[in-house]
Amino acid sequence: MAITLRQSDADFEPRFAAFLLTKREVSADVEAVVRQIIARVRAEGDAALIDYTRTFDQADLKSLGIAVSKDEIARAYEGADAGTIEALEFARDRIRAYHERQRPKDDRYTDAAGVELGARWTAIEAVGLYVPGGTASYPSSVLMNAVPARVAGVERIAIAVPASGGAVPPLVLIAADLAGVSEIYRVGGAQAIAALAYGTETIKPVAKIVGPGNAYVAAAKRQVFGTVGIDMIAGPSEVLVVADGSNNPDWIAADLLAQAEHDVSAQSILITDDPTFGVAVEQAVERQLQSLSRGETAAASWRDFGAVILVPSIEAALPLVDRIAAEHVELAIDDAEGFLSRMRNAGAVFLGRHTPEAIGDYVGGSNHVLPTARSARFSSGLSVLDFVKRTSILKLGPEQLRLLAPAAIALAKAEGLDAHGRSVTIRLNM
Amino acid sequence: MAITLRQSDADFEPRFAAFLLTKREVSADVEAVVRQIIARVRAEGDAALIDYTRTFDQADLKSLGIAVSKDEIARAYEGADAGTIEALEFARDRIRAYHERQRPKDDRYTDAAGVELGARWTAIEAVGLYVPGGTASYPSSVLMNAVPARVAGVERIAIAVPASGGAVPPLVLIAADLAGVSEIYRVGGAQAIAALAYGTETIKPVAKIVGPGNAYVAAAKRQVFGTVGIDMIAGPSEVLVVADGSNNPDWIAADLLAQAEHDVSAQSILITDDPTFGVAVEQAVERQLQSLSRGETAAASWRDFGAVILVPSIEAALPLVDRIAAEHVELAIDDAEGFLSRMRNAGAVFLGRHTPEAIGDYVGGSNHVLPTARSARFSSGLSVLDFVKRTSILKLGPEQLRLLAPAAIALAKAEGLDAHGRSVTIRLNM
């Protein structure tokens, strides 16, 4: 049973504040181990990768090869269900279409003083994409990371994926191929991050590493940050459903469970203005839990982190929604648009009663890599912008320099930076 | 004397590769101390700030107050040079004009399937801006950080600045006021970062912290990251000047020294295709060093990290420029535009012979907070985008859900996520 919080209760504020601070993940202290692994990969290159992979993944990369071959990709297609391949293509095309609208535009202009200014966007040259192994090895995530990179114009995308016993999940290979990724390496963990950041004989270094991973991968990403760029460190997933009493409780229960089944640390929250509806959803959750293959996981998530928040009106939910700043927000209410226009913090919003969040996970087109753990207050989901960078441009002629010089010289003087001033004045005495 | 590297030398490549790896800053290990400071500020709030400030800044905040008053700002104006105030206003206006063009646009559209998609940008609610104390307390940096936040629509901007002996540099107060910042706190170091991240009785918490700082501040920013957003951790500044023999060596020497005077860890690099010109610049550097108030700093930087790289042609400089990926790149060559169009990595580019980098530090309009230490390969300078975040939007009706359902259900099945599939199928049986 999830907890229930009533906004009308006297102790709502402290209880809600405590709820916001709930830590859903204990971060393992793996710093030292990871530091060692990175140092060894830097020193020994491929040999270290081969050795770590033998130990951690029970695979012999000496015979298998570190890089996945074209033949293996071809074999993956042969063994795969045609409907699943089609679904991946359908998803890829929709993701591509959405992200193509995100390409930032260069800017170049001349202002009233005659100064030329601007900004120029260029793609990051090479990006590494980490794909977790085991049950967290989602082909949809390969698409969500690789397609925006491709749209951005990244030339090299290198995937690292642990291959337990040597085998890379075939759908990961297919998703990578469909996304246009040409380099795939069967290495995982901190050793993969080190190889991507510093390079080995087989793996050329990249400039940025993205993608989810376990505690070792996350720690490794933090440690190589600076040498390369990294994306956000993703926490467990969460959904916040704002629903009035006109919804089918079974639909909303299904949405809450779709989040809960990800992980025991996932979080599902319902905010409603209808207490009877809230109870009906809770009953539906219990019922549906009986027939889920990942029922145990979902049950633990719902029990430990699930919540039903009762508000006197949907409007009263607004400040709570902004404070929760959830990764996913479903607005199953009449005036979803109006509510959205007054909202501030959310990774992604799903409007109306026919937009289950799972659509956004796969085929909506928008990205499913989104800010978790309240970080939607200050950050955004993955986009083309994560794979490009901007260079600012400034160009003065002698006249413009004369116009701007006095202020620049005054400020250089005020800051005690003589040479700054001199680099301007020296160009005035012509 | 800076080192000289000749691209025509047989050992150029290993020497250049080693040059790229040169660490210019030893990062002090202050993690443990900072962790303690943060914990104490979280536990004791204002009392901890008052105590730390007594110890580190020799100031009694109990009598002075943690917040800077309106009176103090008024007094700062009274004591300031009118020309400097005007210069700050001139800079602010130009910075504002440049950054107003960076405001991202919302997107909302309906695709061929009738699915409504989009993205909505909102300002971060509250931002903390750290301003270093002492000689690194630059009013120009206050403008460069605060103006884009204001343009982005950030409602609360809170400045933290250490006040040695209780006094905040008056020009910092004036710059803050001109940029529209209303909250200024005289606290510095890790304790200031902790206060901004977690809040105290006097300082309300913010959602993101930006601004440069010493090793303690940098470590504190890393430690609070996740609870709040942070900007990049800036390293020492650097300039790369690409200049042919048609330049006045004195001008180029002044530009190299403008960078070198910042810090002993700053770096100035000249790439030229004219060895005689290279020698002339080196001689001019030595000459100009004699008459600089920060000559010792500049001399140390030039001696330890300065470099003159000789190339057979300006065109041959291109791959080196991209590998150096400098914070600032001056192109004092004939076809600066052509060179720029083929470049990939730089924080900011200054075109032509009349655009000294110092103009960009103050009054060009573009931002002077830029990626250092080769991070221009994967990141960008500060902009309005750092103060906003994006929410993606998805809206389906019953028909659109029917269209997208088969692919979503297929992928949910392939990934073994039953409840994902169910949240879609359950809406189809109406």
Image: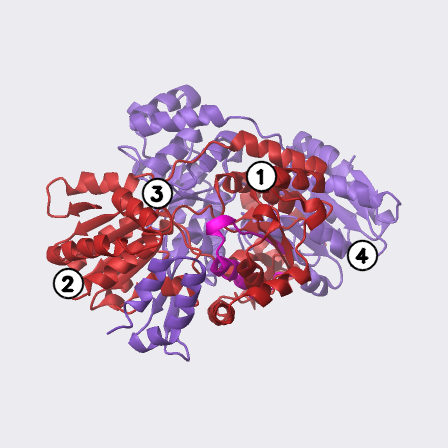
Chain colours: A purple, B red
The reply to whether discs 3 and 4 touch (Cβ–Cβ < 8 Å) is no
Q: Position of residue B287 (x, y in %)?
A: 22, 55
Q: Quadrant of the C terminus of chain A?
A: bottom left
Q: Are dots 1 and 4 on a single chain?
A: no
| Camera-side residue of B134 and B410 | B134
Q: Where is residue A228 in the image (x, y as percent from the top left)?
A: 39, 42
Q: Where is residue A29 in the image (x, y as percent from the top left)?
A: 54, 26
Left or right relative to A281: residue B91: left
Q: Mark 1 points at which residue?
A: B56
Chain letter for the residue marked with disc 1 in the picture = B
Tag on residue A206?
3
Left or right relative to B61: residue A276: right
Check if residue B150 falls in the magenta segment. Answer: yes
Per the model, the C-alpha gap separating discs 3 and 1 is 42 Å
Chain letter for the residue marked with disc 4 in the picture = A
Chain letter for the residue marked with disc 3 in the picture = A
Q: Mark 2 points at which residue?
A: B245
Check if residue B327 falls in the magenta segment. Answer: no
